[in-house]
Amino acid sequence: MTVKALEPLRVPRAFVRYLAPVRQAEWVVYAKPPFGGPENVLEYLGRFTHRVAIANNRLTDFADGMVCFRWEDYRHESRQKVRRLDEQEFIRRFLLHVLPDGFQRIRHYGLLANRHRAIKPARCRQLLAEPAPVFEKPDTPLDYRDRYQLLTGKSLR
């Protein structure tokens, strides 16, 4: 089909009518046994899924239906800890981070997008006549309440 032939499908109702016969069809799915076994399938899929919610290097062990992974405990000075979950709970939590079709992660767009992060905030500060913030790293890690007070001048205590 040419681009010109697809033009009428921009109208939502026309597009739904176009797809109607496909929705009525009875689909038969044929899947061959995985080449090299299920481990190869999981390894292949893992290259794509790890970017969503958890990096491969944070996964420490998978045995006896349990998954172990490293995580940072922000309440205790960002200390690294290991959590162990049964496989179903791990997958349930993992899928909470998968976005529905059509959604995009906001951090990739707008003023703070990676390709604009050096230029756009500086231009906004210039237009607002605001100086760039100065961040000093304290000797000891700050509690979130202290950090809030340092940034806003208001106490949460």
Image (tube, helix red, strand yellow):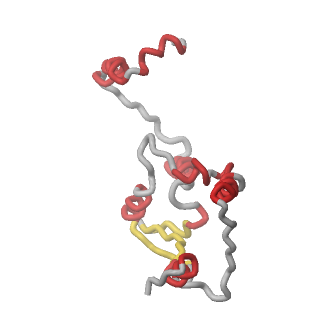
Residue found 49% across the figure and 66% down from its top:
62
Front in this rendered view, residue 58 or 76 = 76
Front in this rendered view, residue 27 or 55 = 55
Residue found 63% across the figure and 88% down from its top:
140
Q: Is residue 61 above or below residue 5?
A: below
Asked whether residue 117 is in view, the answer is no
Residue found 56% across the figure and 69% down from its top:
60
Image coords of residue 121 (percent x, y): 65, 57
**Position of the C terminus by quadrant:** bottom left
Residue found 61% across the figure and 65% down from its top:
57
Image coords of residue 29 (percent x, y): 38, 31
Picture quadrant where residue 138 is located: bottom right
Front in this rendered view, residue 13 or 122 = 122
Q: Is residue 46 above or below residue 55?
A: above
Q: In the orientation shown, which residue stands out farthest toward the left?
A: 24
Front in this rendered view, residue 152 or 138 = 152
Image coords of residue 93 (percent x, y): 40, 62
